[in-house]
Image: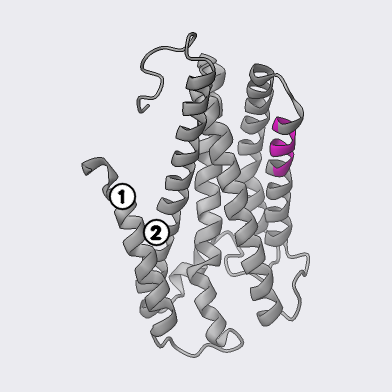
Amino acid sequence: MKNHWWKALSILLLGYTIVAGFLFQFPDLPILNETIRNVFFHIPMWYSMIICFTVSGVYAIRFLLSSDLRFDAGSSQFAFVGLFMGCLGMMTGMEWARVTWGEFWSNDPKQLGALAVLIVYAAYAVLRMFIKNEEAAARISAVFNVFALAMLFPLIFIIPAHAKSLHPGTDGNNFQALYTQSKYLRKVSLPGMVGWILLSVWIGNLRMRLVRIQLHLDLQQYLPKDFLKKD
């Protein structure tokens, strides 16, 4: 039980974020108005995506160094969870853009960078589906994943930060939105950020363990006895 405290913490933080995010009275901001509550969902989903893609890339590197399918399971499943969180972040962001900027899509540099990242990882998912040989799929997709990880931070942070954008965080200040939040918003947005990230890691960990169990059942005679032990 002591190793699962962070799972309980994620539930508590998300529960607090949802309740406080809709019940608290926040300062009335021009244009944003009540849509400011989307900050408790949209931004944490993007950071959850980034964390999952980073974990996925680390597992891909570990697989390439060891050829251990346990690491491939972690790489693939965290990539899928990251893609899911990224799609949620894109949808909540487009709805927010419709209200605040007047349209779902404005070719904003951060929108384009985020879309490029989602396309890259969607290609990763398609690649895994079309390669039938398990070992070949694991190795090829792991190489692809490393290159995807190398593109992640430039597309999300570096390039958009130095281009004219409707988003806060231009001129190289990616965390401007956090600095300019009122103390009331930070009391909800920061716990929400941690809660969403922990939840996405929890989901990725569950999916990874399910795949490892299936591999263990399929290839039991070839795998070591400690296959299901934690890394």
> What residue type is disc 2 on?
Gly
Position of 159 with respect to 38 (left or right) is right
Q: Quadrant of residue 142?
A: top right
Say above or below: 203 vs 47. above
- Residue range of the region highlighted in magenta in the rendering: 122-128
Q: Which residue is mark 1?
A: 6
- CA gap between label 2 and label 1 equals 9 Å
Q: Position of residue 45 (x, y in %)?
A: 53, 59
The quadrant the N terminus occupies is top left
Q: Within 10 angstroms of label 1, few (less than 14), some, or many (20 or more) residues?
A: some
Q: Residue at x 37, y 68 (%)?
A: 15
Q: Which residue is mark 2?
A: 195
Q: Within 10 angstroms of label 2, few (less than 14), some, or many (20 or more) residues?
A: many
Q: Is 156 colored magenta in this rendering?
A: no
- List the single residue furthest toward the top: 222
> What residue type is disc 1 on?
Trp
